[in-house]
Image: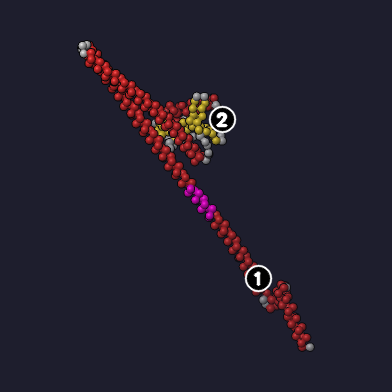
Amino acid sequence: MVIAFAEHLTQLKRQLLELLEKDLEFRYAVAGYLGLSEVLKRLDSIEEGIKRLWEEVKSLREGQNRLWENVNKLWEEVRALREGQNRLWEEVKALREGQNRLWEEVKALREGQNRLWENVNKLWEEVRALREGQNKLWEEVKALREGQDKLWENVNKLWEEVRFLRLNQEEMRRDLRDLRRTVERLALSLEEEARSFIAYRLRRELGVEVELGEVFVDSLEINVYGTVGDLCIVGEATVRLGPSLVEELLEKVEVLKQRRPDLLRRRLLKVIYTSVAIPQALQLAEEKGVWVLKWDKDLTPMKIEERA
């Protein structure tokens, strides 16, 4: 009888423990009976708070990972900006080197011109010497007809002077041909520099990519021309800018409007690239809305004309 009661008690305890473990309402009822209900509720609330806290920690870690990804992307952008800045300095260096080469060409042109004038002066000196010799020769012929041998010697000297004069004349012609070739190379170099630099400024100022070249309307040459979208660029390149070249550019624009309107666009930019400009030319260019610039600065403001 006692053993049976003990076994029944043991089984009852096991059932009570299973109910406490599996049945929440029963556990709260027992806890309330024992005065532990409020403690269990607070423990459950603390456990929920801990779970939410871990979820917040997990969210913070994910946000921190995204923050590091953005920081890495920012550093990549900074590196790309530095590389772009380095490329820009290389372009500036190349432009300066091109300008130095241009000044060397101008210097060589001036030296060639000086040599040409020296040869011209020598030629005139030779001509004057020839005339003086000729006058002396006639005086000798008139005064000393008997000295025929001496006369022929002077005549031979005169022919030598003539041959020397002809040789100098041929040399002067060669110098003129060399000077013409140098001027043509200088003009081509300046036009290429103008197209490259104007395209660079348009890319930097307006954010447009345009390929500039030359265009012919009948026998009329426009050495800076290009279009992009509704924008048309018409311009000239010159070493020294005077008012006549500004007027020439305006006349070329009018020729385009009359003969080849298909080459124009709704917006028009008139531009002149130069090394030196006189004040009268700059005043006229600014009045007519012509953008004048050098490699290092603008001489008149950029103004885009809106056409009807």
Verify whether residue 173 appears in magenta.
no
Q: In this view, does 67 lie above or below 101?
A: below
Q: Label 1 belongs to which residue?
A: 44
The 10 Å Cα crowd at callout 1, few under 14, some 14 to 19, many 20 or more, is few
Q: In which quarter of the image is the C terminus?
A: top right
Residue 238 at least partly seen:
no
Name the residue rendered at 36%, 33% in the picture.
Answer: 107
Q: What element carries label 1?
A: helix
Q: How crowded is mark 2: few (under 14 residues within 10 Å), some or many (20 or more)?
A: few
Residue type at mark 1: give it.
Asp
x, y percentage for residue 178?
39, 28
Task: Kindly give the residue lying farthest to the front in the view shown.
Answer: 149
Residue, disc 2: 308
Q: Which residue is drawn at 69% across and 76% down?
A: 31
Residue 247 position in % (x across, y down): 45, 27
The one nearer the camera, 133 or 297, is: 133
Task: Quarter of the image for the N terminus: give it.
Answer: bottom right
Spot occupied by residue 185 in the image (x, y as percentages of width and height)? 43, 31
**Relative to 203, is 125 on the left or the right?**
left
Residue 78 in the magenta stretch? The answer is yes
Q: Percent x, y for residue 268?
A: 52, 32
- Predominant SS along the magenta part: helix
Q: What residue range appears in magenta?
A: 71-83
Q: Distance between the residues labelled 1 and 2?
A: 79 Å
